[in-house]
Image (spheres, rainbow, N blue to C red):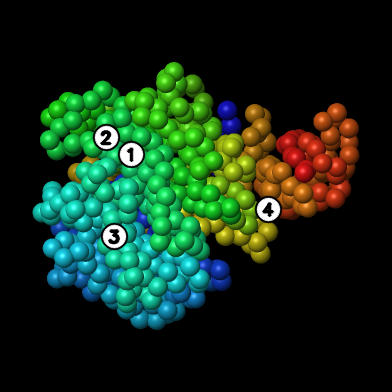
Amino acid sequence: MPYLKQSTSFIEVDVGKTKFDLQTNSSMQKRIHVFEDGTIGTVCTMGFDSPQFPNRGTGYNYFDGNSWGPMSEEPIESERTGWPAYSPWGENGEIIVSHISGGEGHGLLLLKRAAKGQDEWQEINFEGPEGHEDIFWPRVATGGTDFSTIHLLAVTSPVEYNGSLYEGLNGALLYSRSNDGGETWEIENMIIDGIDSSSYLGFQADIYDIRAEGDNVAILIGDYLTDLILLKSTDGGNNWEKTIVWEHPYPKWEYWTGTVSDTFYCPDGAHSLDFDEEGTVHLVFGINRCHGNGINTTWFPAVDGVGYWNESRPTFSNNINALNPYSNPDSELEEDYSLIGWTQDVNNNGEIDILWDDIAIYHCGLSSMPQVIWDDEHNYLAFVYSSLTETYDNGMSNYRHLWQRVSASGGETWGSFTDLTAGQSHQFDECVFPSLATASGGDNFNWPVYHLTYQLDNEPGLALYGAQAYTENLNRYMKTDITTGINETDDPLTNIEVSQNTPNPFTKKSIIYVHLNKQDNLNLEITNMRGERVYGLNLGIKDPGNHKIVIYGSMLNPGMYFYTVSSDEGPITRKMIVE
């Protein structure tokens, strides 16, 4: 098993604040984007006047390349809203979509401007179908040329929110598309084939995600009441292909009237997806259990696991233990392959020392709120999730921290677990609701990094759920090293981190990233499968920080090799393949 790592190099900045602490009901909207010029925009749901929050809305902040702006004191919308989603728009603009709640209008409020961080916001009201104008919990993604195509998701108001059935669905998931900044919509409030009332009873709040990249668009839907569904379009949203990633063992689960069932393992509704450079979808999802006794539905907050899947793999069946993360003989999960996240044994005593009697509730398991991104520049998958973490507690409940794993092999293998929020500075911090930006190339595109925001609280659980009193929470930005945590040696060295070469396999050239915590002497040696040395390089004394080693395929014959990066502290060896 990859070793657990509890330190990393990163930058953290407080960019927002709020007392309203429920940032999402299930999956996290995209809340941050890093633009090509190095500027950054981020949003959060913000409100200060508890407990009703009459002026709740979107808190916004912008990094101009040198510094962040001040934290918002007032929402940017003209009326009460919630749950914003953020995306680039046009050549240099940005767009925010949130739903109106308690305001004068109905439906969604779109805020856009052609010059990010500068122009005045322009507001556009977008409503649901006639008789169902109130639609909620939006998602937005922009694709096409220069992010000019807006792809929008929202759900009709369900019965329990004083809504009514739409097209036979209690919470119909609607898709819309605009190519002119939301002024007109060539597709408006459409139910995509395959998610209509012939297959489902409806969809709950925030159990869906959307990503767009050029003409590729992907939507991920699912929780314990539905299948886990992937809808994918390769023509900008005109046509869709449906894949049932996990099949529900009890179709059309009746939550309110009661379904009788065995206990089964299922997605918990929190998930994330992204495209790789080939257009293949990679996705992660939290895991829970569900049980129905004919009167009510029960879920289990102590279930622990995060699953991974991509389009090259078989789907999961409807066996009640298909997503069992505890080595059940019927489980279709494989540790470090399709089961990639769980609570860590921080103190290495062979047990998980959690204060089990008082787990702060988020309607998900011990490990959830997953996010995944693909870095096109360096061919890495980065995965972050929030997990109950032992040795961090307030005497009553354990805190959740943000944990990272990285794959340099397209999801086939995963590196070590890294607590991104470890250490004394986060001893009493609840770290939840992460949202990842698309990975950027880092400093001069030489060193891969990624960017995220998350909510930081000083008490476990949600005030909105009654777990604590309303206090000020922070929306925090983090920039962290994407190669942190990919060293898979069983005996980790403290000064040096060495990445898997990328790409791997390769033909022309491949890159190894090395991070030093202190000045050290570096050497590279490549050996063939017979142990014969075929190449060596003395890199000399290197200062603390990040370093890049380039290997050219022209130096080697096709085949499998071992490369060893040595410092004064010791060697680290990896496999690589030249094609």
Residue shown at the point (53%, 49%) measured from the top left: 280
Q: Position of residue 17 (x, y in %)?
A: 33, 60
> Do tag 3 and tag 4 residues touch (Cβ < 8 Å)?
no
Distance between mark 3 and mark 4 Cα atoms: 51 Å
Q: Nearer the viewer, residue 512 or 484?
A: 512
Residue holding disc 3: 190
| Residue named by callout 1 | 227
Residue at (68%, 42%) from the top-left corner?
500
Q: Quarter of the image containing the N terminus?
A: top right
Q: Tag 4: residue type?
A: Gly
Residue at 50%, 72% (x, y): give it: 146
Left or right: residue 248 compared with residue 218: left
Disc number at residue 251? 2
In primary-sequence order, the first of circles 3 and 4 is: 3
For disc 4, the marked residue is 545
Position in image of residue 493 (x %, y %): 68, 36
Q: Residue 92 or 507: which is nearer the viewer?
A: 507
Under circle 4, the secondary element is strand
Q: Considering the numbered disc 2 on the image, is that residue within a helix, a strand or a loop?
A: loop
Query: What separation in Å lies between label 3 and label 2 (alpha carbons)?
Result: 23 Å
Q: Quadrant of residue 108?
A: bottom left
Quadrant housing the C terminus: top right
First in sequence: mark 3 vs mark 1: 3
Cα separation, mark 4 vs mark 1, equals: 45 Å
N-terminal of the two: label 2 or label 4?
2
Q: Nearer the viewer, mark 3 or mark 4?
A: 3
Task: Note whether residue 117 is visible.
Answer: yes
Ranked by sequence position, the earlier of labels 4 and 1 is 1
Residue 237 horizontal/vertical position (percent): 41, 61
- Tell me the kind of residue under disc 1: Asp
CA gap between label 1 and label 2 equals 8 Å
Q: Nearer the viewer, mark 2 or mark 4?
A: 2
